[in-house]
Amino acid sequence: MSKNTLYLECYEGITGKMVLEALKELAGGVEAEEGSMQGEILTQIDSLMETLQIEKITASPVWSDKGPTDAAGLAIAARSCGERPERFIVKKVGLGKSYVNLSNGTRAIRTLRAMLIEEEQGSDLWMLESNIDDCSGEIMGYTLELLFDAGARDAFFTPIFMKKNRPAYKLSVLCTEDRIRAIDEILFRETTTIGIRRYRVEREALKRRFFEVELPDGTVRIKACQLPDGATEKRYPEYEDIKKIARETGRSYREVYEEAKTEAEKVSDGFA
């Protein structure tokens, strides 16, 4: 069984028994010894989490005085490593219930929903932008190299006019969320910018694969992109390999490129 994430959803506090009851339902009838002590309940919970192959707990806000929250419930909530991920697949849902005595003498039910989820990696990226009007071309070019070395998916300059009609450049960097801090550090250290804008962007990307073709003058890597119809590919020789052969042989870039593309089209195997 693959590793799972447990998402606990309860906005009015939780108890250990609520969590235990929900986990039993998720485990599909796997029973645990009943216990009344908080430590015993936690032991049972840990056992069921191991059975369910749960490696991480996420939770909605559970620090509430509006409902039952005991030591075992707080201990489980303390293990949470944040709220639920933005993208996930719900594999199974279990419920845990508890009653609370209200001040008017009645009883109300509180419900915990526990979801066994599998996190999905989204294709969202982040765009970082900064307007720069007082930085030399040498510095800008060097910065661009550092950005790609730091994991930027793309980086480019756009000519703009700033206040007082001063010519400038907008530096745009596309990156994954985990590279934002590294990119920020480079921009603040290497350029004269004093501020960086950023926002999330969505990207639709074609599925791709790589293979090699042998030419008389060397090996060329080919990038193949699958079109949305699932049956058609576009194949592109890699720039660096074409450039290397062209420089070593004195042949034109276009000639080597066309030769590599012709060989790539002969390859019959495609996406599985």
Image (cartoon, rainbow, N blue to C red):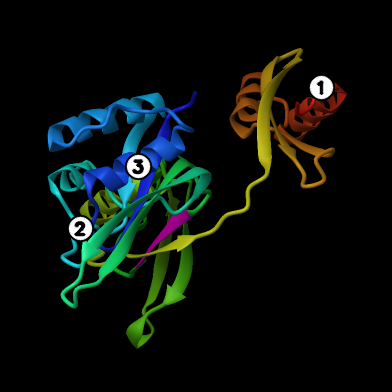
Dot 2, how many residues are within 10 Å of its Cα: few (below 14), some (14-19), or many (20+)?
A: some
Residue 187 visible? The answer is yes
Q: Which mark is residue 240?
A: none
Between residue 199 and residue 122, name the one nearer to us.
Answer: 122
Asked which secondary structure carries label 2, the reply is loop
The residue identified by callout 1 is 269
- Which amino acid does the dot numbered 3 rest on? Glu
Give the alpha-carbon distance from disc 3 to disc 1, as whole Å: 52 Å
Quadrant of the drawing holding the C terminus? top right
Dot 3, how many residues are within 10 Å of its Cα: few (below 14), some (14-19), or many (20+)?
A: many
Instruction: Please state the horizontal and vertical placement of residue 98, each as a whole percent of the image.
Output: 29, 55
Farthest residue to the front: give it. Answer: 105
Q: Earlier in the sequence, mark 3 or mark 1?
A: 3
The residue identified by callout 2 is 68
Residue drawn at point x = 21 percent, y = 32 percent: 35
Q: Which residues are magenta?
A: 125-130
Main secondary structure along the magenta-highlighted residues: strand
The residue identified by callout 3 is 21
Instruction: Please state the horizontal and vertical placement of residue 61, each as a whole percent of the image.
Output: 26, 59
